[in-house]
Image (spheres, rainbow, N blue to C red):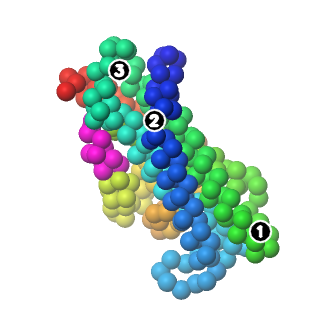
Amino acid sequence: MSRAIRTELLKIGTTRLVLGMLGLTAALNGLVAVATCTKAGNGGGGFTVPPLYTVGGLRMVLTSGGFGLIIAAVFGATVTSGEFRHRTATDTFLDEPSRVRVLIAKAISAALTGLVLGLVGTAVTTGIGLGFVATKTYSVALPASTIIRFSAGVIIGCGLLAAIGAAVGALIRSQIGSVIAVFIWGFGVEKILGGISRALAAYLPYTAATTLAGARSGEGMPQLPVGLSALPFIAVVALLAGAAVLMAAVSAATTVQADVA
């Protein structure tokens, strides 16, 4: 298994996909963080951000990197579905006949890369948020332990969503289809289901990952449902890990075993 994981990490490291995803994560998180900091304390409009010297204001900035989470899931989906799009799956399976082993290796390598995406995303968001606080000579309203906890949540959330995305990509096979499915689920299906049931919303993967990153009711990017009660940190980690295992099991039992076109 370690050899298969090293092979998949080598594939990932020798493509431009990772650099593109890292750049996109940094750019989107940076843009949202700057916009949120600029909006803080100004009032007006439908989206109000408290001043940066308050706990609520600083938390909203530090937890505004939700796009990094969805990018991690998209990356995972691309890692597996890309093999079928570029018709390299046959060579991969010839090198490692156990398709389940290949899927596991891809999910683990996607998760490891997702951790890096999360690290970059939270570094940009946190750096910009604390930079604005320092520029305005405000006191940091949140303790260092809380800021570290938010960052850890982003990093872990990105890693687990990347693993889920890898399973989705293997299940759908179509690269475009799997990427679209990730976006529709994260920005469409979960928003609808969360609006119908606040109790259910906390158990939805993308929503749960956003709360793992520190966002609370009415916060985050995109905005979480108002009235949402977040699950405990460990419970969310277990939920996302379980979702990754479940999706991988479904993929392994169905499309992974199908003929390669």
Front residue of 135/108: it is 135
Residue 248 image offset from top left, x and y in percent: 37, 31
In the picture of the structure, the residue carrying the numbered disc 3 is 92
Question: Between marks 1 and 2, how big is the CA–CA gap?
Answer: 38 Å
10 Å crowding of disc 1: few (<14), some (14-19), many (20+): few
Magenta span main SS: helix
Q: Residue at x 46, y 40 (%)?
A: 16
In the picture of the structure, the residue carrying the numbered disc 2 is 15
Q: Residue at x 32, y 19 (%)?
A: 91
10 Å crowding of disc 2: few (<14), some (14-19), many (20+): few
The reply to whether residue 164 is visible in this rendering is no
Which mark, by number, is residue 134? 1
- Assess whether mark 1 and mark 3 are in contact (beta carbons under 8 angstroms): no
Q: Amino acid at mark 2?
A: Thr
Q: Which residues are magenta?
A: 171-182
Q: Residue at x 66, y 63 (%)?
A: 128
Say which label, 3 or 1, has the lower sequence index: 3
Q: Secondary structure at mark 3?
A: helix
Say which label, 2 or 3, has the lower sequence index: 2
Would you say 120 lies left or right of 103 here? right
10 Å crowding of disc 3: few (<14), some (14-19), many (20+): some
Q: Is residue 181 magenta?
A: yes
Q: Secondary structure at mark 2?
A: loop
